[in-house]
Image: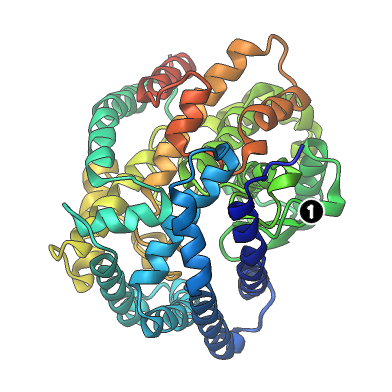
Amino acid sequence: MKLFKNPTILKILDYYKNLWSLSYVSGVTHWDLETYMPKLGAGARGEALGRLSVIRQKMFLDREFVNLIHKSESIKSLNDQERAVVRILLHDLKFYDKLPPKFLKEFEILTNTATVIWREAKKKSDFKLFQKPLVKIFEMNRQMADYLGYTNSPYDALLDLFEEGLKVSTVESFFKTIKGPLKKLLTKIVKSKKYIKVHRLEKTKYDTAKMKVLNEKVLNYFWSDMDRFRLDISSHPFTTSFGKDDTRITTWYHDTDFSRSLMATIHEFGHALYSLQSSDGLEMTPVAGGSSLVIHESQSRFWENFIGRSPEFINTFLDDFREVVNDPKLTADDIYLYFNKVSPGLLRVEADEVTYHFHIMIRYEIEKEIIEGKLKIKDIKEAWNTKMKDYLGIVPKKDSEGVLQDIHWSGGAVGYFPTYSLGTFLGAQWEDKISGELRKKNYREIKLWLEKYIHRYGSTYTMEELLQNNKMKFDPAVNLNYLKEKYIKLYQ
Ligand SMILES: [Zn+2]
């Protein structure tokens, strides 16, 4: 079946292939920057990417192309995919139309060099090294918000870059809803007799070579077609897709705590699956892959939390876990507690299902305060530590475990973090729906379900529309209830 038929849309898509090819090239270049590029390549790479983004902008603003987009706005007979083309291109158009080319290029160059500086600063655990580029990154983000326009908070304009239409008011009320219940649950857990601060496996050294084999084996188990998919290593795990036949993920390895590597791999697989199962007909169009980060994150967190941490998964790979840490006596219960243990920690990516959201709230509050001019970068470390103490009762001793831990700011992304929490909560709703509809759950059936109801549409629907199509409404209570039930039982 042909997804696109309208002649105006077909003309748009034909021209769009030029834009797609530029995104393709800069995508591969970005992937290389994060994985294999030698450190000193950053200067030239930033220049090349900066120029590419200006070329893309110029190409996007081609008068005939823009006219076609505007013309298609008033066509009544468009199908869902065609309407999505118009919706997504109008959103992009706003971005390209309002940001001066000079600004775009400067921002690209800044973030490329900042990523390398951040890596160095994190390695040396010295915030001072990163302070200057960070000031510039937030300044430019504020400027970007001013260019793009907003009614209430400039942070609204930045949220919209990652999740169309997301507003501070929505994020605030979401965090307000979940904060109390999560704090209450955490207090209960910490008071439980079964509470442990550190599981011994967190300190146990693992064999990296064996861990690599295990990651590959797990991926192979979930997805057998490795001709369209690959795994590499980077300083922060991520997923990128150049179409459904070339989707790549990365993971990381540390000396100890193997679940960190494993959960990152499974998380990124959840993202990859979205692209791998996207409909053929959407390839090389603006609708390919997922544009809503909340939906995307709901996929990765679904796989991480509901598959990776599940007893079924643990039983399947128990022998492999034993092998990785060289402990033949390890029990499934032991691993289950290790994967699901709740305790306040310093690192977001390692955080359990309960404390995770406090890490996000801290970042959200800090970003918003800086963008609204209420907090200065030079005071950010102190603000971070105060909030950590307040939300989680602990304070980082090293910058690398505090304000420097995440890659996002160095890449210029401000307004991204809330999508993690929202996505996690949405992930629990998919789990709720899937377990209600599939009597016997196996990975094959789950994948088919996700393909049928989510993945094949790419970014045809906004989050709200997708939920509506599935007769659902975003409801934080689903995840809150799941967490309460699971962890009261585990810590009883
Ligand atoms: Zn993710």
Image quadrant where one finds the N terminus: top right
The residue located at (59%, 57%) in the rendering is: 237
Q: Nearer the viewer, residue 368 or 462?
A: 462
Residue 371 is situated, as x and y percent measured from the top left of the image, at 22, 63
Residue 226 is situated, as x and y percent measured from the top left of the image, at 85, 50
Residue 325 is situated, as x and y percent measured from the top left of the image, at 72, 44
Secondary structure type for disc 1: loop
The amino acid on which the numbered mark 1 sits, given as a three-letter code, is: Asp
- From this view, report whether residue 117 is shown above or below residue 217: below
Residue 300 falls in image quadrant: top right
Q: How is the image coloured?
A: rainbow
- From this view, report whether residue 442 is shown above or below residue 130: above
- From this view, report whether residue 203 is shown above or below residue 130: above
Disc 1: which residue: 245
The residue located at (37%, 21%) in the rendering is: 192
Q: Is mark 1 within 8 Å of ligand 1?
A: no
